[in-house]
Structure formats: C-alpha cells, structure tokens
C-alpha cells in the first residue's frame, strides 16, 4: 500500500477493517472487527424505509512524537446520544462509543497519516435501525459501525478561501425539527441545494433561519463564524443549528487568546457586509475562510475584505487550534486522548 499522504482528498478509501456492534433483545453485543466493508440487511430494515440513521465525524492525529491522539471524542459520544434520542434509537453508551473508536483506530494504525503531511484519520461512527419494520415505529434492532479512513482537506486545501452562496429556495432545518442533531436525513435533504450551488460555482452553501429567512443559520456541513471589525468572534445562536464541536473549541481558544466571543442571532442583511473575516468551521472543513457570499435569488454579492486569503484573527485561531490537535501546543483543556 503506497499512499501519497499530502495529496489525499476527503474521500472514501477502504482500510483494514471497521468495528461493528449489534443491539438485539435490549442489549448490545461486544462488537467485532470486520474486514469486509459490506453489511447484510433485511429489505425491511427501518433505516432503508424511514431513514432511522445517525452519524458522527471526528479525527485522530499523529503527532511529531509519532503518537496517535483522538480529539474530543467524549463530545461526539454525547452528541451521538442526543441524535439517538431524537430518533428513538437504542443509545450507544459513552464508554462503548469510545472503545469502538479506539478499536477502529488501533486496527488501522497504518492508515493514520504521518505528522507533517496535513492529513488526518477521519472517524465516522454510524448508527442504523436495522430491525425489520413496516409500520412507522422505532426499530427493535440496531447496528453501530465505526469506520475510519485517511483524509486530506475537504475543499481546496489548507486555508484557501472559498466562495459561498446563500440559498433561499430551500431550508436546511425547521424550528423544532432535526437541525440540532446529526441525522442522515438532514444531509439527504441538503443534496439538491448543494448540487445547485456547486453547478453555479459555489463549493459551499449558506442557510438562513427557516421561519423568517432573516438570521444566519449555518452552512450545509459546517457552522458559520465571523470576526467583527472590532475584533469579536461571533457565531449564530439558534436551536436549529448543529452544535459544532469545532465551533465550541474555537470559542474556547478565542477566549484563551483574549478575543471576546458573542453567540447571538446574526441578521444577514444588516451585518454581512460589515464583517472583517468570515469562515466555515467543522471537523471536516476545520476553518475554511469565505471570500464572497452571493445571494442566488437576487444576485447580490458581498466580498469579504480578506479576499482569497485567511484574515489575521482566523489565522491565529487556526494555528492555535490545529497546534493543539497535532500535539504541538499544550493541551490545556484535556481535549486529546492518546491511543498509542
Ligand atoms: N454543521 C453541520 C451541518 C455539520 O454537518 C457539521 C459537521 O459535523 C458541523 C456543523 C460541524 O460540527 P463539528 O465541528 O462537530 O464537526
Ligand atoms: C464533519 O465535519 O465531520 C462532518 O460530518 C461533515 C460531513 C457531513 C462531511
């Protein structure tokens, strides 16, 4: 196996194995490493008919010292439980989630990219309602999978800015809907606007709140963050946005660096032209600066003062945050867990 680590993109790649657990008769089994990347399902499996499926995304990093560390997996484990609760699924106990992640990494150590290549190991836990179910009701059986793969940048790479478009024709999540949990159906519903955006030349699509189309919500697969001209970190406060672990960590890093943090509604038309720096943040996209936002419906455009590059405040946040993730800066909040 020869992998050119520095040329990796964010795409699926088969590895040695995944870890698979089954829930039946009210309990989880002990899980197994499986080399075949295929599963067998009943044609009546709940996930196939009613979309009872949730997932997570987290990363492991190989540090300069050669050690492999996973980042804030307790947070992903908790969010996975919230998503399971929202979809009436058998919750995965926190310890079992963490054990599964560790098992999947350990069994695929040769796929954790070397330090200095910029590549990471992406970890994708998935929970499926697998029991046969034709009346609409929760499944009685579940499959929990943790798969891993080495990945590179989600968009162009590093801190290169991308153009975003504002989508008015479709909403990402309704108030009191499922926006705040990581449910597969949210992403199925996002494919059409996302493909539209891509065809129009925008790799990333931004949504406003569904009720009024007034306040910024988030991007299709990442949170919205901005730096104001007077140097504050702002991010939307909305119950229908996914609580991003990256956003949470960046807020902490910002506070540590003395940058004031504001989590509040952001009125798109009133504020978008005034920001000094704008970016998307998330596990897959890390921090991806936004160079311009175009409202497709009206053709209006807002160019960010930072142009195609990353602004100084976001750059500082990026350097500090990724420095902690790679084990190059002190892990003062206890975010990393050494795997081996
Ligand atoms: N928002 C959405 C819709 C996402 O899919 C993601 C990715 O997980 C995020 C935000 C970022 O969340 P996190 O930082 O926990 O990866
Ligand atoms: C992540 O950032 O981990 C995500 O899950 C985003 C994804 C939909 C690619």
Image (cartoon, rainbow, N blue to C red):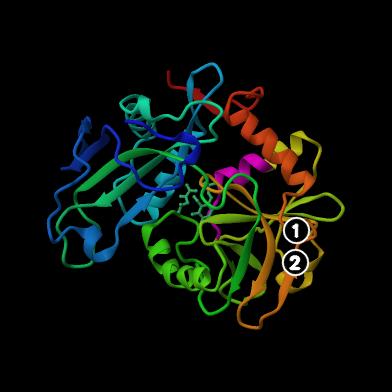
**Circle 2 SS class:** strand
In the rendered image, which residue does mark 2 sit on?
303
The structure residue drawn at horizontal position 62% and vertical position 29%, both measured from the top left corner, is 324
The structure residue drawn at horizontal position 55% and vertical position 59%, both measured from the top left corner, is 241
Name of the residue lying farthest toward the right? 230
Residue 164 position by quadrant: bottom right
Q: Which residues are magenta?
A: 241-250
Reply above or below: 254 against 214. above
Image quadrant in which the N terminus is located: top left
x and y percent of residue 259 in the render?
A: 80, 42
x and y percent of residue 8 in the render?
A: 46, 41
Viewer-side residue, 259 vs 327: 327
In the rendered image, which residue does mark 1 sit on?
307
Q: Is 232 one of the magenta-colored residues?
A: no
**Circle 1 SS class:** loop
Reply above or below: 312 against 203. above
x and y percent of residue 157 in the render?
A: 57, 47
Q: Mark 1 and 2 residues: CB-CB less than 8 Å, in contact?
A: yes
């Amino acid at each position: 196996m020869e992998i050119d680590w520095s040329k990796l993109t964010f795409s699926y790649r088969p590895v040695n194995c995944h870890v698979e657990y089954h829930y039946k008769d009210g309990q989880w089994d002990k899980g197994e490493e499986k080399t075949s990347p295929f599963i067998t399902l009943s044609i009546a499996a709940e996930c196939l008919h009613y979309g009872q499926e949730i997932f997570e995304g987290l990363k492991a990093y190989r540090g300069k010292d050669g050690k492999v560390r996973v980042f804030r997996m307790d947070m992903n484990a908790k969010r996975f439980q919230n998503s399971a609760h929202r979809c009436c699924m058998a919750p995965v106990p926190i310890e079992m989630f963490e054990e599964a992640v560790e098992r999947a990494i350990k069994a695929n150590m040769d796929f954790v990219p070397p330090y200095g290549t910029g590549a990471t190991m992406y970890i994708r836990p998935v929970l499926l309602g697998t029991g046969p179910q034709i009346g609409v009701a929760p499944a009685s059986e579940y499959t929990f999978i943790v798969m891993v793969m080495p990945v590179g940048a989600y968009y162009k790479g590093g801190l290169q800015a991308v153009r975003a478009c504002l989508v008015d024709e479709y909403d990402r999540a309704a108030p009191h809907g499922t926006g705040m949990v990581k449910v597969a159906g949210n992403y199925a519903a996002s494919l059409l606007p996302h493909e539209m955006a891509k065809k129009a030349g925008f790799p990333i699509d931004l949504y406003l709140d569904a009720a009024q189309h007034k306040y910024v919500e988030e991007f299709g697969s990442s949170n919205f963050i901005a730096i104001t001209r007077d140097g504050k970190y702002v991010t939307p406060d909305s119950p229908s946005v996914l609580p991003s672990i990256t956003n949470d960590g960046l807020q902490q890093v910002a506070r540590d660096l003395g940058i004031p943090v504001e989590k509040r509604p952001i009125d798109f038309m009133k504020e978008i032209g005034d920001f000094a720096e704008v970016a998307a943040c998330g596990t897959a996209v890390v921090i991806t600066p936004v160079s311009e936002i175009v409202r497709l419906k009206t053709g209006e455009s807002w160019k960010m003062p930072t142009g195609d590059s990353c602004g100084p405040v976001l750059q500082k946040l990026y350097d500090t945050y990724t420095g902690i993730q790679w084990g190059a800066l002190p892990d003062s909040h206890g975010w990393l867990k050494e795997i081996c």
